[in-house]
Image: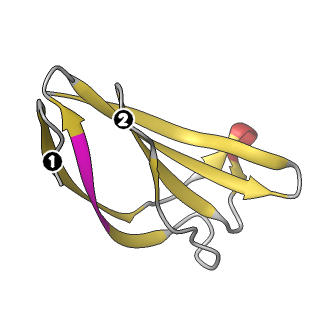
């Protein structure tokens, strides 16, 4: 349901290619995507546990974007025994 003064943005997280951590360490498993907007709750994709540096999510999201929002951010993260790590991010502006 759309909130007043907002719009729905449909996003699909598809996959990643050749993802690495700092120092070009290959990712073995447990990657996911966080969708962030200026003033709404973050949405998190399912975790890919099998495809390492070539994750596949194939997940569709309906993101409630405030009308005043000028961008959203996609952040890829990886969870391993040493903690939760940022792999990369992109800021998409309208």
User: Of all residues shown, which one is farthest toward the front?
Assistant: 4
In the picture of the structure, the residue carrying the numbered disc 2 is 40
Quadrant of residue 57 within the rendered picture: bottom left
Quick one: label 2, few (<14), some, or many (20+) residues within 10 Å? few
What residue is rendered at 45% in x and 60% in y? 17
Q: Quadrant of the N terminus?
A: bottom left
Indicate the colouring scheme.
secondary structure
In the picture of the structure, the residue carrying the numbered disc 1 is 2
55 vs 7, left or right, is right
User: Of all residues shown, which one is farthest toward the bottom?
Assistant: 50
SS label for mark 1: loop
Quick one: label 1, few (<14), some, or many (20+) residues within 10 Å? few
Quadrant of residue 31 within the rendered picture: bottom right
- Magenta segment includes 75: no
SS label for mark 2: loop
What residue is rendered at 68% in x and 68% in y? 29
Which disc, if any, is residue 80? Answer: none
Percent coordinates x, y for residue 49 in the rendering: 64, 75
Give the Cα separation between the discs numbered 1 and 2: 12 Å
What residue is rendered at 36% in x and 35% in y? 40
14 vs 33, left or right, is left
Q: Name the N-terminal-most of marks 1 and 2.
A: 1
What residue is rendered at 18% in x and 41% in y? 3
Percent coordinates x, y for residue 54 in the rendering: 51, 67
Percent coordinates x, y for residue 44 in the rendering: 48, 55
Relative vertical location of residue 91 with respect to residue 84 in this rendering, above or below: above
Mark nearer the viewer, 1 or 2:
1
Percent coordinates x, y for residue 71 in the rendering: 25, 27
* Residue bounds of the magenta highlight: 60-64
């Amino acid at each position: 349901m759309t909130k007043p003064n907002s719009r729905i943005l449909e996003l699909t997280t598809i996959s990643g290619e050749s993802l690495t951590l700092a120092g070009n360490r290959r990712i073995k498993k447990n990657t996911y995507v966080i969708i962030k907007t200026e003033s709404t709750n973050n949405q998190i994709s399912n975790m890919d546990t099998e495809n390492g540096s070539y994750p596949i999510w194939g997940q569709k999201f309906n993101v409630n974007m405030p009308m005043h929002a000028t961008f959203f951010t996609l952040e890829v993260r990886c969870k391993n025994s040493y903690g939760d790590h940022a792999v990369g991010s992109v800021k998409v502006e309208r």
